Amino acid sequence: MIQAIFVAKKSAQSQVEIDAVKVDMGKGIVGDRYYGKKGSDGPNITFVESEEIAAFNANFGQNIGLSATRRNIVTQGVRLNQLVGQEFSIGDVRFYGVELCEPCASFGKSLANDSISSPQVVRAWLRRGGLRANVLSTGILRTGMQFNLIPRNSK
């Protein structure tokens, strides 16, 4: 399910948590910094598992919040890695899981501190950093909404 939703109007701006967002097919989240930037052929929304945030905090003695990864949608009870190459829906909105959202150097720097270095952060989040997806239909997403895998033969 969707545990939290975050958007930032500009790249360097802090993310704001909201309860509901409109997503547009091929463009992403209305009002987000990446809205329409990748075009219809590129990933335009990001997801991360709340369980991975909690595991990072527990394993490395950290206390990062749900917005620290700068992903748009924080999930609970969803194995995002399994959605790469899959179509799924949240409510009436359809998505396609394009690729893992692997950590970059900037991600490492943003979470590094005196007790964990930037390279350690990047290694800790490899294959745990979430999912980049394409928005395949327009609609509204709200916290609490459930994910559904769409069988390949029902497209």
Image (cartoon, grey):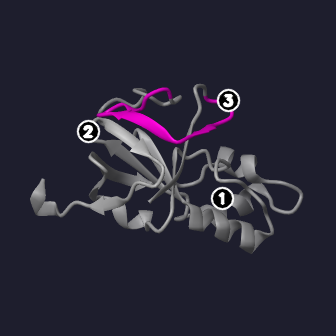
Q: Can residue 42 be seen in this view?
A: no
Say whether disc 3 or disc 1 marks the residue closer to the N-terminus.
3
Magenta-highlighted residues? 11-31
Q: Position of residue 70 (x, y in %)?
A: 61, 44
Say whether disc 3 or disc 2 marks the residue closer to the N-terminus.
3
Residue indicated by mark 3: 13
Residue located at (44% from left, 45% from top) = 142
Location of the N terminus by quadrant is: bottom left
Residue indicated by mark 1: 122
Q: Does the magenta stretch include residue 24?
A: yes
Label 1 vs label 2, nearer the camera:
2
Residue indicated by mark 2: 137
Q: Where is residue 71 in the image (x, y as percent from the top left)?
A: 55, 47
Question: Dot 3: within a 10 Å radius of its alpha carbon, few (fewer than 14), some, or many (20 or more) residues?
Answer: few
- Residue 9's tag is none
Using residue 95 as the reference point, say whether residue 22 is left or right of it: right
Q: Which of 99 and 138 is in front in this view?
A: 138
In the image as oriented, which residue stretches furthest toward the left?
153
Q: Does the magenta stretch include residue 18?
A: yes
